[in-house]
Amino acid sequence: MRFQDLNWKDVESYLQIDNRVILITGSTEQHAYLSLMTDILIPSKIALAVAERESVLVAPPFNFGVAPHFEDFPGTISLSQETFDAVLYEIVESLMHQGFSNFLILNGHGGNQLPARIRALSDDGDVHVEWLNWWESTAAKTMQTEIGMQIDHANWGENFTFTRVGELPDELRDAVKPPVNLELQDADERQTMREVLGDGSYGGAYQIDDRVTTQLYLNIVDEVCASIRAMKF
């Protein structure tokens, strides 16, 4: 169930029997040969599959995240940490006011973190909040161990049929890890993130057998369903 498919009376009726909601956070940013919306498409696809199975409501995705390191790549839209925190907090606060009290925040971007004010709400017992980075799920970690390959930015682990927007290289790229603070480099040697990353991938295989990534997706859906089921009304 999605907000866009309901009117306000439908949501009011839902709240008579359930107080759970899935929030989707991610980023609009470069992903090499994959969609700029990869970090939204993956958690959205997971959330909608969970919603169908568990009859839980999914709020509209928060499409922008903290991604200043990719601003040299056209199409990236970045928020400051303060703006991200403020907007997500106000989304939660709005829904709390209406009666939602069990929140699963399904995150698709490594630069996003659970805002301290939302964590405080949960710690105080006002609401129950769970934050899940999908690539850090047990299902994702298990798959990486099984196939001996690591999920990283814009590599096979984010390459699903629904994030692909063109042809991808059929090769293995050496790992490219940018320095944490490029601005601390010597001025004469300093490079932009774009110069360090090239096409934008952090390395590894660009693509693998779709059967593997499809199974990865299905396993994560199972895990998120279990998490939602454990939230009591």
Image (cartoon, rainbow, N blue to C red):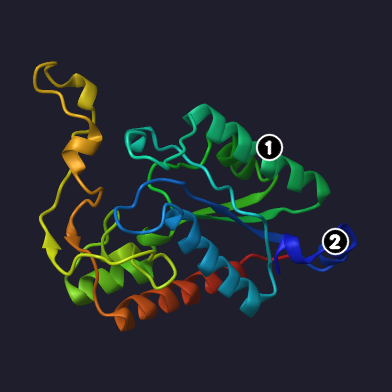
Residue furthest bottom in the image: 211
Which residue is label 2 attached to?
7
Left or right position of 104 against 151: right
Instruction: Name the residue type under label 1.
Output: Glu
Q: Please tell me which residue is depicted at 15% across the width and 47% down the height of the picture.
A: 176
Q: Please tell me which residue is depicted at 63% across the width and 65% down the height of the picture.
A: 231
Taking depth in this image into account, of 114 and 28 the one nearest to the observer is: 28
Taking depth in this image into account, of 123 and 65 the one nearest to the observer is: 65
Left or right position of 94 against 148: right
Left or right position of 105 against 55: left
User: In terms of secondary structure, where does tag 2 sit?
Assistant: loop
Across and down, in percent, residue 156 comes to 27, 66
Q: In the displayed structure, would residue 5 be above or below residue 93?
A: below
Across and down, in percent, residue 233 comes to 74, 65
Which disc, if any, is residue 72? none
Which disc, if any, is residue 90? 1
Left or right position of 47 against 107: right
